[in-house]
Image (cartoon, rainbow, N blue to C red):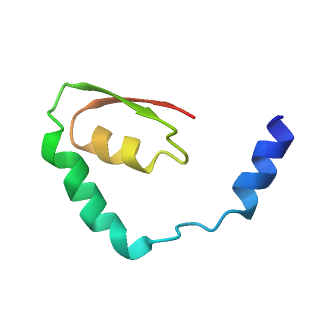
Amino acid sequence: MREWYEQVWESAPPDPEPWAWPRRRAWLLEEARPGERVLDLGCGAGRFLRALGEAGCEPVGVE
């Protein structure tokens, strides 16, 4: 199973919509509060987790 996921990950484009990231990040951080624990289900590469951590949240990701 691990090998399959690695193949899928390596074959995926880095970001299918790079132009949308700034707006998505802003939307995500509207509700985030420093110190809050946030669960990201299906976190992928952890882009939202990183943004939440930088905003002072305690993010937890599960793929």
Q: Position of residue 39 (x, y in %)?
A: 38, 28
**In the figure, is residue 55 to the left or right of 59?**
left
Residue at left offset 21%, top offset 35%: 56
Q: Position of residue 49 (x, y in %)?
A: 39, 41
From this view, report whether residue 34 is shown above or below residue 3. Answer: above
Q: Position of residue 5 (x, y in %)?
A: 76, 44
Outermost residue on the bottom side: it is 19
Q: How many marks?
A: 0
**In the figure, is residue 5 to the left or right of 53?**
right
Q: Position of residue 25 (x, y in %)?
A: 28, 56
Residue at left offset 25%, top offset 32%: 57
From this view, report whether residue 26 is shown above or below residue 13. Answer: above
Q: Quadrant of the N terminus?
A: top right
Residue at left offset 15%, top offset 40%: 31
Residue at left offset 45%, top offset 71%: 17
Q: Quadrant of the C terminus?
A: top right
From this view, report whether residue 20 is shown above or below residue 39. Answer: below
